[in-house]
Amino acid sequence: MYATVQASERLIAASRSLIGAAGAPATAPGLELLRDQVCAEAGVWAPEAAARALRQARGDVGRAVTLVRVWAATLPAHAAEPCDDASVRITRRVSAAFADIPGGQWLGSSPDFDSRLLDWGEADESPAAVLDGAGGAANGDPAGTGAPRRTALGRVGGLLRAAPGVGVAEPRDPGDGPDPFDEPLGSNPTREARQAALARGETGALVALANVALAGRREAVAGELCVGVAELCVPHPRSGRPVRVAEVPVSEATVCGDAEVDGTAGFALGFGISAGRVERRALAAAVIDATLEAGAPVGGLAELPALAAVDGLATSGFVDHLRLPHFASFASYLDRVRNPEGPR
Amino acid sequence: MSAEPAIAWDRVDDARAAFRACLDALSRPGTRVRGLPMPGLAADPGRDAGAGILLALLDRGVALACDGDAETARIAATVRGLTGACETGVEDADFVLAGPGGDPALAARARRGSALAPDRGATLVYAGSGGRGCEARLSGPGVEGTPAAALPLGAEEVESLRLANASPPLGVDVLAVAPDGSLVGIPRSVIGT
Amino acid sequence: MRPPTVAELAARHARSAPYAYLDERSKREVRRAILKALCIPGRQVPFASREMPIARGWGSGGLQVTLSCVGPGDVVKVIDQGDDGSFNAAAMRELIGSSADARTTTRTAEATLIQSRHRIPELPLRADQLLILQLPHPEPLRRVVSDPRRAARLHEAGDYTAAWLDLYDDEARHGAPRSGADHPVLVDRRALASPSPVPRHDVLRLSDRPHPILLGAGRLERIVAIPPHTDVRPLAFDDRPLRPEAFGGSCSRCGSETSYRVERELGGGRWECSDTDACAERRRGREAPT
């Protein structure tokens, strides 16, 4: 266990070696994070389907997400047991707010140590290797033995709430309705529904909105960023006992943003979560959630337009629809331009 | 027409040295900064150091005007050729090379920028002024107190500068090279009042 | 054996990396902006930011300023929130030192160039040192005026009413400004600027320094400069001076009661100097003379 990350070469080398599934060489990375992104945006954890969809869509992420979503809609659905902190094994957990947090900081496979210089060295460029790469298995367990469960670590948000003299905005009622994935957003979404929409949000839109939201904040710090593997269980059809059927990588973040609480400076806590290991998604979602919890608009947008903007299937579909014929409706507007009513 | 001296200019090291000298000069207006690199473009050390400053800072898309004698024009043309800077009149220039025989009220004609874009104010490089010099009182950022500084500029030039810089943040900034090749920086912020 | 692609040929025959990573044209762009910025203290000067091997938002602007200034005779220190050891500071120190063939150091007193994210070094700096700050949000009016063009017009008019009203609102309703770090400052009594997200403790130490301060914003493509001996004061009403942060204890490592300290763990009661080199100096019992 260690506190702030010191740049010791041993540490950086250890982190770099964790890239990809355990045992696979770090020099042959595939597009596993792109697969994670497609799964997250589709709301379906199925890396093989995502890889196949990316190939079929010739790399168009929006199209691939649609393929996966449509395919999943045809499959029979089983209710899964709710997944709680006890079923999540941590592979990475860092805080930018405090050097020491209960449970400690776990560096894991940090994306920050990847070089940003394009590497022209030898690489296996066969299609299979490119798409599947070293990270073919979704659930490499890089943390190895000793990796704690999420329950063992506590939450930084809880720390702030419990701290004397620190005001934290009351969270929006999470709601207790049906699975938000099955329900439309409605005109007054619960926080749970908001989280579900952000969790499946289009990555570029999440990042863009988080940026405009950050420009207007006084303070926004990642209280906690956690990447882990969640065990998904379904009840056995005969015995009814929970049976583990999948291990899904999950990224979650808590952002501590500024807010006015009881007439003084305080915090609004934002929570963001996403399937997969694209950490930026969870961070961006947490920033947007923190902004909404503080009662502030997201880049000038109220909650519903902001959530609509991150609905990738809807937004990309609507932009693409501009290619469809608009002859009749266009002619109507042309008439308005050419024949204005009333005196000229 | 004298033969052009051989040029000795390292685009990396000499450019950096000239830039650092300008940074020091403009950070501490009125003080003398020495050690400017000499490209060998002119026989006179003052003019040569001024040419070096322009070689270090100019580029394609930057406009250089000149105001002064034939040697000033020759140096400006050579610098343009070497850097790709374009030629304009004084009113439109980003940089002006000012030499002997030039207009003492040059500062009044140079671009002063606007309140919206004060960074558009021109930089005047005075070089080859011979023995011209006067004392002037500077005050403002970079200057401790209000000392009298020895400037390698004529009194008329200084007066013209004060007028041009009378409405901050508009103004023109000066890099004045002394006959021995040393440099004095006079940003608009210290010579407007 | 298929013929090489254009990309492969480019990679194979590319010129070796230029001195200090940036090509000379990029450096000239940054250098012209720096010199002009020194002449209009506190005003934002635009420049064409170049792609850096560190992400925008991670100090690419500060890095471009450093790379445009550094020479082989310089000694470079890079700190991140006061710490030389943070991985981002170390990565930048390595990039600058190796590409510029310059010595690097963690000792403030030895450095000629100091690039810093969000702290002013605690030890007093000298006239021959250059401080370069990473500036994420160059526009001090961004929270009260969201449109950058309108903000530019307010700077043009010298009209900072919006900022004063926002401050008055905080003072009247909460008794103090609600911001932590990045409190706006007036430079040379004229230009409102962001000092970068340094704590208030540091905002109160910006005025009348013996060395220049350069601030680089790579993402938003602006450079701001503060010459030595320049008046820099926080935006504050005369009867409501800006209050620096309070600390719950002396430094547990060196015992300082004057440095900017942070609590390692919320409520843990253990406070430490954020400036690791200054703390180490005190522990060595060799504080630089003030």
Image: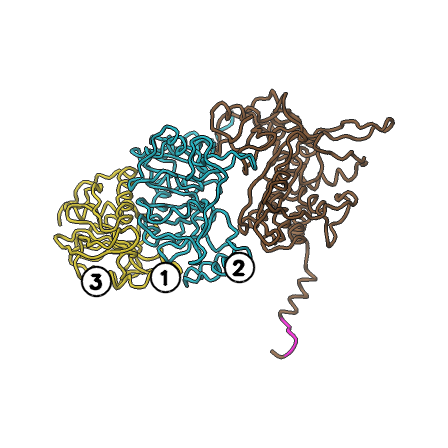
Chain colours: A brown, B yellow, C cyan
* Image x and y of residue A153, in percent: 64, 31
Q: Regarding mark 2 in the picture, which secondary structure is present there?
A: helix
User: Mark 2 against mark 3, which lies toward the viewer?
Assistant: 2
Image mark for residue C172: 2
Q: Residue C154 is drawn in which quadrant? A: bottom left
Mark 1 highlights which residue?
B114
Disc 2 is attached to a residue of which chain?
A: C
Mark 3 highlights which residue?
B159
User: Mark 3 against mark 1, which lies toward the viewer?
Assistant: 3
* Cα separation between marks 2 and 3: 48 Å
Given the current orientation, which residue lies at the most extreme right position? A238
In the foreground, C239 or B32: C239
Q: What residue is drawn where x is 87% and y is 27%?
A: A238
* Image x and y of residue B113, in percent: 34, 60
Q: Is residue A281 at all visible to an observer of this figure?
A: no
- Amino acid carrying label 2: it is Ala
Count of marks placed on residues: 3
Q: Regarding mark 1 in the picture, which secondary structure is present there?
A: loop
- Amino acid carrying label 3: it is Glu
In the foreground, B3 or A130: A130
Given the current orientation, which residue lies at the most extreme bottom position? A343
* Cα separation between marks 3 and 1: 21 Å
N-terminal of the pair, mark 3 or mark 1, is 1
* Image x and y of residue B184, in percent: 22, 49
Q: Residue C273 is drawn in which quadrant? A: top left
* Image x and y of residue A17, in percent: 55, 23
Do callouts 2 and 1 point to residues on the same chain?
no
Q: Regarding mark 3 in the picture, which secondary structure is present there?
A: helix
Disc 1 is attached to a residue of which chain?
A: B
